[in-house]
Image (spheres, helix red, strand yellow):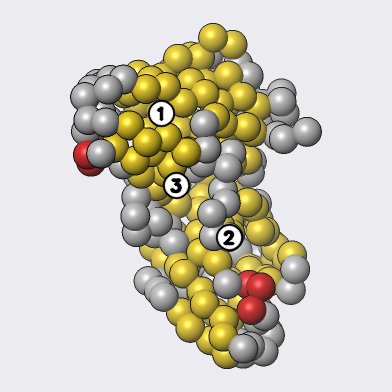
Amino acid sequence: DTAVSQTPKYLVTQMGNDKSIKCEQNLGHDTMYWYKQDSKKFLKIMFSYNNKELIINETVPNRFSPKSPDKAHLNLHINSLELGDSAVYFCASCRQADTEAFFGQGTRLTVV
Amino acid sequence: GNSVTQMEGPVTLSEEAFLTINCTYTATGYPSLFWYVQYPGEGLQLLLKATKADDKGSNKGFEATYRKETTSFHLEKGSVQVSDSAVYFCALSARGGYQKVTFGIGTKLQVIP
């Protein structure tokens, strides 16, 4: 069983569209994250949730809205997609703050 | 705030060469330290970790020692293989609370036969 799974793996869409990326973890972790990785491989945290509660919201355009229906799921919805949103988005989870994070395989978003 | 400074790549080595990737950190308190590896087209996976000063993390021939006095966690391997080609990330996370995992910029390693 995959520990952290996210779908879709690839997403190609036009500017202005709205899209969602889904993430599920079966590890029983309380904390989940969304990270954005740019073309230079730099990882930037976007959001952190703990038990469905938003803990960290870095400086991210409000076109990005996370949703956590339960502590095993953290979805990312993006409105009015822009070219600059093209990146790989990673979902991750961890048991608590000082333990290792488990990552999904990533979603490569391409906005054309 | 917390931060991780990692040497920039890319690093190109011949097979069986010795590898060092430098990493230093700034943090309040006593963070846990990690090295993650990202193979092409994949997500990050934990390579090794250390949770307190003088701990040595090791896995797959890689090692790193938590040095509180120099705030460092350098990654080393005595003899690299072509299959080690990947991007390596140094990271830290703080105890208590729900702080983020802070990553370095990543160092791309290419090992040539």
* Residue positioned 34% across, 59% down in the render: A40
Residue type beneath disc 2: Tyr
Dot 2, how many residues are within 10 Å of its Cα: few (below 14), some (14-19), or many (20+)? some
* Residue positioned 34% across, 50% down in the render: A38
* Left or right for A45, reference A15: right
Instruction: Work out which quarter of the rendered image holds the C terminus of chain B and state it.
Output: bottom right
Asked if marks 1 and 3 fall on the same chain, the answer is: no
Q: Which label's residue is closer to the chain start, 3 or 2?
A: 2
B94 or B87, nearer to the observer: B87
Q: Could one spot residue A97 in this view of the protein?
A: no
Labels 2 & 1 near each other (Cβ < 8 A): no
Judging from the image, mark 1 belongs to the subunit labelled: A
Question: What residue did someone put label 1 on?
Answer: A47
Dot 3, how many residues are within 10 Å of its Cα: few (below 14), some (14-19), or many (20+)? many
CA distance separating discs 2 and 1:
24 Å
* Residue positioned 47% across, 38% down in the render: A10
Question: What residue did someone put label 2 on?
Answer: B39
Rendered location of residue A107, percent (x, y): 48, 38
Q: Secondary structure at mark 2?
A: loop
Judging from the image, mark 2 belongs to the subunit labelled: B
Corner quadrant of residue A56: top left
* Left or right for A44, reference B86: left
Judging from the image, mark 3 belongs to the subunit labelled: B
**Disc marking residue B102:** 3
